Amino acid sequence: MQKRAGLARALALDPQILFFDEPSAGLDPVSAMNLDQLILELRDSLGTTLVIVTHDLDSIFNIGSDAVYLDPNSHSILGRGAPQQLLKNPPAPEITEFLTRANGRTTTIY
């Protein structure tokens, strides 16, 4: 409920860009999925650009259209593109490791 209230406060200002920092942190999987759906509905209905910082693979694949992978070691961008494309044709092995949770499994795509 706090996340929805924060989102409502941000939307009251009619922004062109909305920034989210780990929006599904601390949520159970069902609530996280519902929040992802709400974010998509807001994007589509308001035409707002969304910038989301997240480590949640389900969210990355479900709501991400242009992902940027930042390398903590080199402090640079290792890859950018649609999450599905980064998984199919990763420009660096670290991206495959991250997107498959280092075990070759992919996340559930809804």
Image: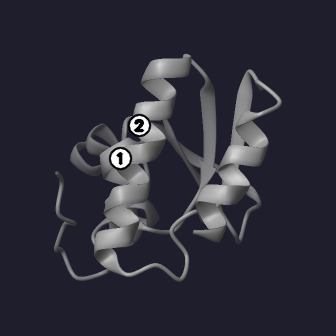
Q: What's the distance in space between the residues labelled 1 and 2, CA to CA?
A: 5 Å
Residue 104 in the image, given as x and y percentages of width and height: 18, 74
Identify the residue at horizontal 28%, vertical 50% (top origin). Answer: 87
User: Residue 91's spot in the image, x, y percent?
Assistant: 41, 46
| Residue at numbered disc 1 | 37
In x, y percent, where is residue 5?
67, 58
Residue 101 appearing in the image? no
Q: Is residue 7 left or right of residue 84?
A: right
Q: Which amino acid does label 2 sit on?
A: Leu
Q: Where is residue 85 in the image (x, y as percent from the top left)?
A: 29, 38
Q: Which residue type does callout 1 highlight?
A: Gln
Q: To which residue does mark 2 refer?
A: 40
Image position of 45 with respect to 65: above or below: above
From the viewer's side, name the closer residue of 87 and 13: 13
- The quadrant in which residue 47 appears is top right
Question: In this orientation, which residue lies closer to the viewer: 34 or 91?
Answer: 34
- Of residues 101 and 1, the one drawn nearer to the viewer in this rendering: 1
Tags 1 and 2 touching, CB below 8 Å: yes
